Image (cartoon, rainbow, N blue to C red):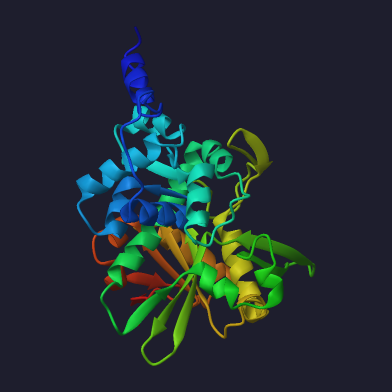
Amino acid sequence: MPADATVRRKGTKRFVRPESLPPYSLTQRGLALLAHVARHRLIASDDLALLDGGSAQNVKRELRLLWAHGYLMRPGAQIQSTILIGPQPMVYGLTNRGARMLHTEGYRIDPEIDWSENTRRSGVAFIEHSTARSRLMAGLEVGLRGRDDVALVHAQEIIDSSPPQTRQASQPLKWTAKIPMDDGRVVPSAVIADDLFALRFADGTESYFLVEIDRGQMPVRRSSNVEEIVEGKKRMRTYFMHKLATYWHGWKQGRHVQQFGVEQIRVLTVTTSEKRIETMLDALRDVTGGKGSEMFLFIDEAAFAAVNPIDAAWVTGKDRVCRIVD
């Protein structure tokens, strides 16, 4: 028997619901956990425990019951990561049953979306990207609890207050720009941010942020290999400098005002290493004609995880260190 066959067989059992269901009545904690999963789409059990604020053991027990009774799903692709790098916190997504329950209980959610299929189809790269995003947002939410000088505003609230074209858009976080080229052409471009949030301060002012999660899987600068395979499909290879250019020129063209009705916005990038940040800063200087820009903030995963996220030291596009509440 191959060495990993036993691991695969044992691991697979974690993704098959028990035939004999344990008794369970949906609790307020269970509803709150379902709401967290709905907001984040895919989120790891340790981040759900962080958001819950109670005993991690009790939260994970509740999650197992929600999964066993069909309110949550464990995307099967994550077993591939377990085989390669060992046990990881379980990742959960919402099912149609979970969405219907939230809708019945008065939560704002579209029960017509096929939540189960969206969760089931999640591949390894998408799971890793999504859980990195939810880890960032969960950390910010918990880091701000109990403070009366600043509050977190989630994406949906911002979108609800945005101009009609954004409220009605199927992809409200799609950011477009016209990028001038060296040969005189102007090329339309677009990126879809991974998330959006604002910090609301006691004096009534707000700071807005678009979120980019960079897993180090795309080159920072254009690669000679223009095609890549993602989730089994061929597509044109993207590169991070293109994203920087799209955000930069869109900002200069007033995209933040047109799209969200706000006077200022910044782009936060969480990436894999300090060295990659240095490469991004160099690319940004090329995009901005050597000036850099305070519009962009960068941090690596280890630095973000080491402290309260609100106190984390971000590197600006001008190579200066700041906090997002500064």
Q: Residue at x 37, y 53 (%)?
A: 33
Q: Is residue 215 visible?
A: no
The residue nearer to you, when weighing 57 against 43, is 57
The residue nearer to you, when weighing 216 against 200, is 200
Tell me residue 218's x, y (percent). Answer: 53, 48
Tell me residue 182's x, y (percent). Answer: 73, 67
Residue 51 image-quadrant placement = bottom left
Quadrant of the image for the N terminus? Answer: top left
Q: Residue at x 24, y 64 (%)?
A: 307
Residue 148 image-quadrant placement = bottom left
Tell me residue 152's x, y (percent). Answer: 40, 74
- Classify 287 as above or below 27: below
Q: Is residue 29 visible?
A: yes
- Classify 271 as above or below 121: below
Residue 319 image-quadrant placement = bottom left
Q: Residue at x 37, y 57 (%)?
A: 32
Report the residue that reaches farthest toward the bottom: 203
Report the residue that reaches farthest toward the top: 1
Q: Is residue 223 left or right of residue 145?
A: right
The residue nearer to you, when weighing 144 against 227, is 144
- Classify 21 as above or below 64: above
Quadrant of the image for the C terminus? Answer: bottom left
- Classify 302 as above or below 197: above
Tell me residue 231's x, y (percent). Answer: 58, 36
Q: Residue at x 39, y 54 (%)?
A: 31
Give the number of callouts: 0
